[in-house]
Amino acid sequence: MVYDLAMKVLAAGLLLMISIQAHLIVSATAAAAGDVAGPSKIRIRQVPAMYVFGDSTLDVGNNNYLPGADVPRANMPLYGIDYLGSKPTGRFSNGYNVADFIAKKLGLKESPPAYLSLAPRTTPLVVTALAEGVSYASAGAGILDSTNAGNNIPLSKQLRYFESTKAEMQAKVGSAAVRFLLSRSFVLLGIGSNDLFVFAAAAPTPTPADVVALYSGLISNYSAAITDLYGMGARKFGIINAGLLGCVPAVRALSTTGACDDGLNQLAAGFDGALQSLMASLAARLPGLVYSLADSHGLTQATFADPQASGYTTIDSACCGSGRLGADSDCLPNSTLCGNHDQFVFWDRVHPSQRAGELSAAAFYDGAPEFTAPINFKQLARKI
Ligand SMILES: *[C@@H]1O[C@H](CO)[C@@H](O)[C@H](O)[C@H]1NC(C)=O
Ligand SMILES: *[C@@H]1O[C@H](CO)[C@@H](O)[C@H](O)[C@H]1NC(C)=O
């Protein structure tokens, strides 16, 4: 009932915006946002909504709804210990993750909610999808369906969920309003690391031909996914590349000295190079597509070169875990915790801390220019 009313107001608002030169309203809002100085309780929307696709770095609870003992879930303490009410939400973090902080920069309260927390009830799904967006991200997911198959929502299925969300939105407010909304919304993508981890585990000493075949499969499927989203009306793509995978505590722990795995870092760097070329070619081919490629890999390298500059004391161990480098177990209810959570880059043996997510979002939104190309997330949000 309340939802129905909210929906009517929302639909009326959307249609009104279209009828009275929406461009002007959107650019006026964006311009006004630039005038807000310092931290403020007032959030000014940079985009009408945000749709999120990816893996555990962005998941805000989808995996809590997947059946099976082998599904990775962050739904118990000590995950979420620094979230509101110390609540474990499904985020692989002590609090917010990078999607939340990007959402905050865009003027949302936090990441839009997990798709599976909204579906199968149509009205909450549609209202949320129209008013703020939806997250389809799922821990363990890859670009390839085969990556950790059966224990996550692979990218291809995340897109089908988005397609069905779009159909529900259209049924409610019509296709013109949805086209308008999607073309101005922020589409956040961060995926590929799991494909690389799985490949590296299966082929510790791959041949160059194996690596070429891997990249070609990943890039062609990523290309198909982005083209599919474009076909459904998405235009603004914020994409986070594969990070410094060889330096996560779980990988360092495999080395007797605790060193990073350079081979895995190079594998990720090669993928990131191919991704950069892919985005340039898609932008040249698909009219109206705009993107910002965020260099998580380069940012982590820069951070590790001078951790103190970012307030970190520890870059090699998990804050929550057990044993050497905190990497002998996942973050569990009985895990030992580090003292100051913000001084650790890693929360658990694979995932960044809330603080690391915050610093990444700040860098990608409007930080040092070398970590985004060809524009930053803020400039992307303000395009048309
Ligand atoms: C990737 O692309 C291949 C070739 O087009 C296709 O057969 C396969 O289904 C895709 N795999 C995914 C989405 O994992
Ligand atoms: C912590 O809990 C896990 C799983 O419940 C158990 O396997 C492990 O032995 C416990 N560790 C300690 C130190 O009690």
Image (spheres, rainbow, N blue to C red):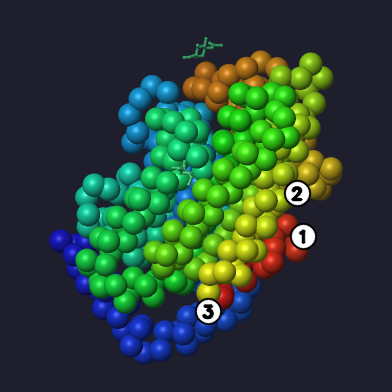
Q: Which residue is mark 3?
A: 384
Task: State whether residue 314 is above or below residue 134.
Answer: above
Residue 300: x and y, percent? 74, 44
Check disc 3 and report its element: helix, strand or loop.
loop
Q: Is residue 384 left or right of residue 350?
A: left
Residue 185: x and y, percent? 46, 67
Q: Residues within 10 Å of mark 3 (few under 14, many from 20)?
A: few
Residue 350: x and y, percent? 61, 31
Q: Earlier in the sequence, mark 2 or mark 1?
A: 2
Question: Please, what is the three-letter code of the amino acid marked with disc 3?
Answer: Ile
The one of 58 and 224 positioned closer to us in this rendering = 224
* Rendered image: mark on residue 370: 1
CB within 8 Å, label 2 to label 1: yes
Q: Is residue 301 left or right of residue 349?
A: right
Q: Is residue 317 left or right of residue 24?
A: right
Q: CA distance from mark 2 to mark 3?
A: 29 Å
Check disc 2 and report its element: helix, strand or loop.
helix
The one of 303 and 228 positioned closer to us in this rendering = 228
Question: Please, what is the three-letter code of the amino acid marked with disc 2?
Answer: Gly
Q: Name the residue: 65% across, 22% down.
A: 327
Q: Name the residue: 49% across, 22% down.
A: 333
Q: CA distance from mark 2 to mark 1?
A: 8 Å
Q: Is mark 1 within 8 Å of ligand 1?
A: no
Q: Is residue 312 visible?
A: yes
Residue occupying the far left of the picture: 1
Q: Which residue is mark 2?
A: 298
